[in-house]
Amino acid sequence: MLLTVIAFVVALGVLIAVHEYGHYRVAVACGVKVERFSVGFGKALLRWQPKRQHPGQQTEFVIGAFPFGGYVKMLDEREGPVAPEERHRAFNTQPLRSRAAIVAAGPIANLLLAVVLYTAVNWIGVQEPVAKLARPVAASLAEAAGLRGGEHITQAGFDGDLSPVQSFEDLRWRMTRGALDGHDLTLEVAGEPGRPARQLVLPLSRMETKDADPQMFRKIGVVAPLTRPEIGEVMAGSAAESAGLRNGDVVRAIGDTAIVDGQQLREVIRASVDGDQPRTQAWQVERGGQPLKIDVKPEVREEGGVKVGRIGAYVGAPPEMVTVRQGLVDGVWRGVVRTWEVSALTVRMMGKMVIGEASLKNLSGPLTIADYAGKSASLGFTQYLVFLALISVSLGVLNLMPLPVLDGGHLMYYLWEGLTGKSVSDAWMERLQRGGVALLLVMMSVALFNDVTRLFG
């Protein structure tokens, strides 16, 4: 819990500070006087005024008690009286291009931060599962495409443009893009020794999915990387302990079904129920090289309104891992590409939610962000950097939305001014601001409801 709080607060602080610094730095470059730079709202926990600042600047820097936001207060005639000798340094008196640049600088700073973070991860390297596939979910797209489990995917791409697959997570990202965009994904499967590689097509265009969630991958059929069907830690008082299963047991068969990987074993356990009753099954287990037969009666649990079997033990050995690392130049390029891909996918998802082609369940709020902050931090430094990059992209894209209270809304005002030669009237500005606040509150309410539903069921 403490790690989650710390990781969440650090993430918010970094992302907000970078966003506001973008506004601040470009404002100073345009000759606008910045009166205050604040990360957070409410009571000031810390405030200072550096002695060395840009000529003409006397900016006060503040860290507020409430971390959900920040602001850069600039000299502006709309906010209060401005001395005649400083009027040329007020925000509202600047040329249109300067005002637009200052407003756009915040979201752009977040996108640049994502590039830097993805680049750092590419240079440092991250441990990820090898792109070897577990047995696909029954009656899924993967099974229909000819996947049977154990395949090593070496390349994948859309419209015949294949590129190397570096890890299972890389493959999952491509499947996510294909499923949400309705594009088929071509896979190249490494051949057996002495045999050539083969290609098959994962028909993701057949999917009708509105949510980027685990159920999407179950429909695709590729849920997890290949793992050894081994029993891990057994919980006290569980069905696994009652049956006599031990840590290190390798499951070879359940009934007449041969077990080849951990994902398949989990699926068979889940399906070992008849209505509300568990189904006792004969397991063929290898323990210390010796075969054993054990009768296992799982416990019945309800997940998403469906009765499933559980044995109360970790199922499946850790997958084979690979270190994904890039060179100096390639790491930067891949950082730029990944930022662009995530940004484009985020924009498309937002557009689909607006027109009803994607579910509003995809909106996440502070509780989900905090949860993922803690989980990513617990997995290691590089995973936390990936999380920060993803949230930084989301923050940048969100702020570019044409909502009046966001940076994108102000850019729309400036677009109108550029096209008509007249600024938006105060009356219309007030109406648009009210509408924007109302819409933003609705979005925040939906996101918070999704958070509570997702985390507390």
Image: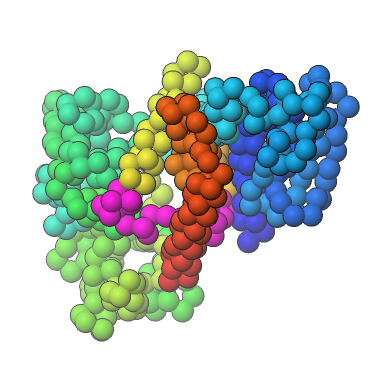
Residue, x 29% and y 40% (percent of image)? 177
Predominant SS of the magenta segment: helix
Q: Residue 450 placed where, x, y %?
A: 43, 63
The stretch in magenta equals 352-374
Q: Quadrant of the N terminus?
A: bottom right
Q: Residue furthest bottom?
A: 277
Q: Nearer the viewer, residue 66 or 26?
A: 26
- Residue 359 belongs to the span the image colors magenta: yes
* Left or right: residue 94 compared with residue 119: right
Q: Nearer the viewer, residue 322 or 218?
A: 218
- Residue 409 belongs to the span the image colors magenta: no
Residue, x 38% and y 54% (percent of image)? 362
How is the rendered protein coloured?
A: rainbow
Residue, x 70% and y 35% (percent of image)? 76
Q: Residue furthest top?
A: 329
Answer yes or no: is residue 172 visible: no
Answer yes or no: is residue 100 visible: yes
* Left or right: residue 11 compared with residue 43: left
Q: Quadrant of the C terminus?
A: bottom left
Q: Is residue 269 above or below residue 41?
A: below
Q: Residue 79 placed where, x, y %?
A: 71, 42
